[in-house]
Image: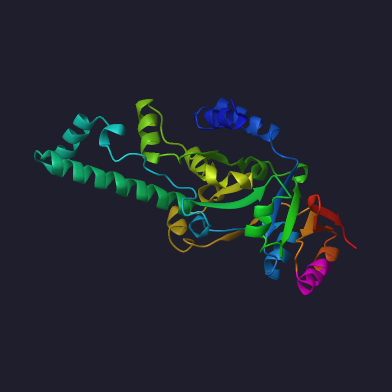
Amino acid sequence: MDWKDEFLRLYLSGEVEDHRQALELKEKNLPQKLYRFRPGNNMNFVRDELLGLIYIPFIGGLNDPFDSSSLMLSSSLSDYFDSIAYKKAFEKIWGKELPGDVYKRQAEKQLIELNQYFNYTLQTALRVASFSEKLTNLPMWSHYANEHKGICFEYDISKIVDPYIKNRLFPVKYAPSLPNAIALMEERMAEHKQPSFTLYDYFAMSKLDDWAYEKEWRLIINLGLEMVKQEDAEGKLAGQGMLHWFEKPSKIYFGAKIPEAQKATIKELCKNHNIEMRQMKCTEYGLKDFPME
């Protein structure tokens, strides 16, 4: 069994001891270094990140339209609920017997609306910052570092002393399909378990196989754990990113095609913060990093 599967089993169980074991297992598998690819053309962001502050965007603004989402895998009610019992409950609410086709349309509509509300609540409650395990990841340099014209921050995970921050770092689990909130909640109710805040983390950790090349880890910030009220998360903070303390980068890598003027500005900032600098180059042996000339 992949260690991520065992981690998720323990993390989602709802038992205190399992939760502790899950965090210990995750810490054992944390990479020594994580990499954050950035365009590097917004100097305010660069200054913040050199100080240890990272920008965490609103999930709805990320490039994956299904990021941190529940996808319903079936339109059949019987795949989620005991259809007879659910129909009786539905008729009790309506106060009359419902024809089969009317019941089916209303029940499916209700399930879809419930799933949509779950996604809305999840995306307003969470913010995520993304990292990769691999520095020489060509698609990452292309997609997130402005086609090699940007930068990449290296973070030494051993320097993170805040246990809260380390506990909020999660691996992304890639799968052929995304989890289904309706089915998961039904499963938990069948086991007489209450839904847990860890379910939100689970959805933020889950991505489709198409994204596996990213080798991603995420800092997942739950606004509820940060003492943000739900009405604020769904109100004035909805759709907005935020700055959050993380850790100062241990190194910065300049993209192979970074403009000289942009590079010069960032070099001065790095000197002021005593950050080691490296230069990426395209070589006959692939993408390599070299000391600054």
Residue at 10% from the left image edge and 40% from the top image edge = 99
The residue lying at 66 percent from left, 30 percent from top is 24
Q: Give the range drawn in magenta.
A: 259-268
Q: Quadrant of the C terminus?
A: bottom right
Query: Is residue 289 visible to us here?
Result: yes
Q: In this view, does 29 lie to the left or right of 232?
A: right
Q: Position of residue 251 (x, y in %)?
A: 80, 54
Quadrant in which residue 52 is drawn: bottom right
Q: Position of residue 4 (x, y in %)?
A: 59, 32
Is 218 or 92 nearer to us in this picture? 218
Residue 264 on the magenta segment: yes
Relative image position of residue 32 (x, y in whole percent): 75, 41
Q: How many labels does the image show?
A: 0
Q: In this view, does 207 lie above or below 241?
A: above
Q: In the figure, 150 relative to 202: above or below?
A: below
Residue sitting nearer the eye, 220 or 103: 103
Q: In which quarter of the image is residue 289?
A: bottom right
Q: Residue furthest right?
A: 293
Q: Measuring from the top left, give residue 291's x and y in whole percent.
A: 88, 57
Nearest the camera: 289 or 17?
Answer: 289
- From the image, give the main secondary structure of the stretch colored magenta: helix
